[in-house]
C-alpha cells in the first residue's frame, strides 16, 4: 500500500513538471564568467583570479575572469544585475560600487534588489597616519589640535573610501579637518610625507611600509579590533565605540539565481578562505580573509553597509565634482 505522501511523490515524478526536474542539466555544465569592475593588474583583479582559479578546480568547469572597468566599477555590477540568473555569471565587487556609489550616482540598477550576495570574501583595514615628526602622537592629541586650528586631510578623491572614512572620523570625533582630494591615494601620501597635508587614512598594507621606514606615524586603525601586525596601534573603536571602516570584497550573482547554487558557491568560497594556504595568499595581496558568511548573512551585511555609508554621505554632504 502506498501512503498519500508516497503516492504524491510518485505521481509528481510521472508529471511533465517532474520529468523536467529530472532532466534539467546539473549545474555547472559549461564555463562560468566572473566579472570585475577594475582593470587587469590591480589588487581586485588578483583577488578575482585567485578565487576563480580555486572555484574552477572545485566545480570542474572553466572560470573566466572578465575585466569590465568603468563608472567607478558600477558598469560590471550593472551587467551582472541584468544577466540571466542561471549561475553562469558572477561578480566580484566591493564596498564602493555596492554600498557607496548608489548614494552618489544615478545608477541603472539597485544593488540591493538586482544582485544576490553569495559571500563576503575579504576586507582591508585602513590606518590613520600622520608624518613621523607631527606633534600629534595619539588620536586624542590630534583631535585636540583641531580645536585650535583646522588641519588638512588628504584622500584619493571625492567619494572614495579613505575620503568617506575621514568624514566618518570627523563626525565621530568632532575634529576640524579640511578635506583635500587628490587624483589617487599615492599622490596624497606623497604630500603627507612631504608635510603639505597633516593626516590621511590609507590601507594598512600601504601605510605599514612608510611606518616601518620612519616616514609616518600610525595613530589608529579602522578595524573593530587592533590589527595583528600593528598590536600597539589602537583601534578607533576604542575611542569611538562602533567605529568601523573596512573596505570589503564580495562575490554576488544576479537576483533570482537559484538558492542551491548560491549556497554551494558560498560553501566553496568560505572553504577557500579557511584554508591556511588560501589565507597566506590573500594576506600577501593585502586582503584579510573573512570566512563565515552565508548568502543571507552577506545580504544582511551589505544592507547595513549601504545604510551606514549613505548616512555618512548625507551628514557630510558629500558631492562629486
Image (spheres, rainbow, N blue to C red):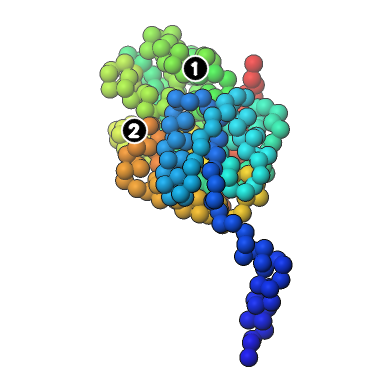
For this rendering, which residue is in front, 280 or 314?
280
Question: Where 41 falls versus 17 (above or below)?
Answer: above
Please report the residue visible at 51 percent of the width from the left and 37 percent of the height from the top. Answer: 64
Q: Can you tell which of label 1 and label 2 is closer to the viewer?
A: 2
Among all residues in the image, which is located at the extreme left? 213
Residue 133 image point, x, y percent = 32, 14
Residue shown at the point (38%, 28%) measured from the top left: 204
Relative to 259, residue 286 above or below: above
Pointers 1 and 2 in contact (C-beta within 8 Å): no
- Mark number displayed over residue 49: none
- The residue carrying mark 1 is 184
x then y, percent, for residue 280: 32, 39
Cα distance between the residues tagged 1 and 2: 22 Å
Camera sees residue 141? no
- Nearest to N terminus: mark 1 or mark 2: 1
**What residue sits right under mark 2 in the picture?**
284
Q: Callout 1 environment at 10 Å: few (<14), some (14 to 19), or many (20+)?
A: few
Q: Nearer the viewer, residue 136 or 162?
A: 162
Secondary structure of the residue carrying numbered label 2: helix
> Would residue 47 appear left or right of 261 to someone viewing this image?
left
User: Which residue is situated farthest in the bottom direction here?
Assistant: 1
Amino acid at each position: 500500500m502506498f501512503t498519500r505522501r508516497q503516492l504524491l511523490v510518485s505521481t509528481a515524478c510521472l508529471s511533465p513538471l517532474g520529468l523536467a526536474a529530472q532532466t534539467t542539466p546539473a549545474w555547472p555544465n559549461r564555463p562560468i564568467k566572473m566579472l570585475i569592475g577594475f582593470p587587469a593588474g590591480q589588487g581586485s583583479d588578483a583577488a578575482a583570479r585567485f578565487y576563480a582559479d580555486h572555484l574552477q578546480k572545485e566545480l570542474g568547469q572553466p572560470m573566466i575572469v572578465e575585466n569590465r572597468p568603468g563608472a567607478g566599477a558600477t558598469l560590471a555590477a550593472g551587467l551582472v544585475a541584468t544577466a540571466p540568473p542561471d549561475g553562469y555569471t558572477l561578480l566580484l565587487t566591493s564596498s564602493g560600487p555596492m554600498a557607496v556609489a548608489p548614494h552618489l550616482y544615478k545608477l541603472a540598477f539597485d544593488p540591493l534588489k538586482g544582485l544576490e550576495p553569495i559571500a563576503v570574501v575579504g576586507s582591508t583595514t585602513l590606518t590613520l597616519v600622520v608624518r613621523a615628526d607631527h606633534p600629534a602622537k595619539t588620536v586624542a592629541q590630534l583631535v585636540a589640535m583641531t580645536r585650535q586650528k583646522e588641519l588638512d586631510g588628504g584622500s584619493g578623491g571625492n567619494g572614495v573610501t579613505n575620503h568617506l572614512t575621514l568624514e566618518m572620523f570627523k563626525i565621530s570625533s568632532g575634529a576640524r579637518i579640511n578635506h583635500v582630494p587628490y587624483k589617487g591615494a599615492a599622490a596624497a601620501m606623497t604630500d603627507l610625507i612631504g608635510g603639505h597635508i597633516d593626516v590621511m587614512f590609507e590601507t594598512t598594507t600601504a601605510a605599514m611600509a612608510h611606518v616601518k621606514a620612519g616616514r609616518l606615524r600610525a595613530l589608529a586603525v579602522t578595524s573593530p579590533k587592533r590589527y595583528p601586525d600593528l598590536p600597539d596601534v589602537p583601534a578607533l573603536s576604542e575611542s569611538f565605540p562602533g567605529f568601523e571602516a573596512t573596505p570589503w570584497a564580495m562575490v554576488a550573482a544576479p537576483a533570482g539565481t537559484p538558492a542551491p547554487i548560491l549556497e554551494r558557491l558560498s560553501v566553496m568560497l568560505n572553504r577557500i578562505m579557511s584554508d591556511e594556504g588560501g589565507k597566506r595568499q590573500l594576506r600577501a595581496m593585502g586582503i584579510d580573509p573573512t570566512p563565515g558568511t552565508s548568502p543571507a548573512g552577506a545580504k544582511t551585511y551589505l544592507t547595513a553597509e549601504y545604510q551606514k555609508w549613505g548616512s555618512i554621505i548625507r551628514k557630510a554632504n558629500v558631492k562629486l565634482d
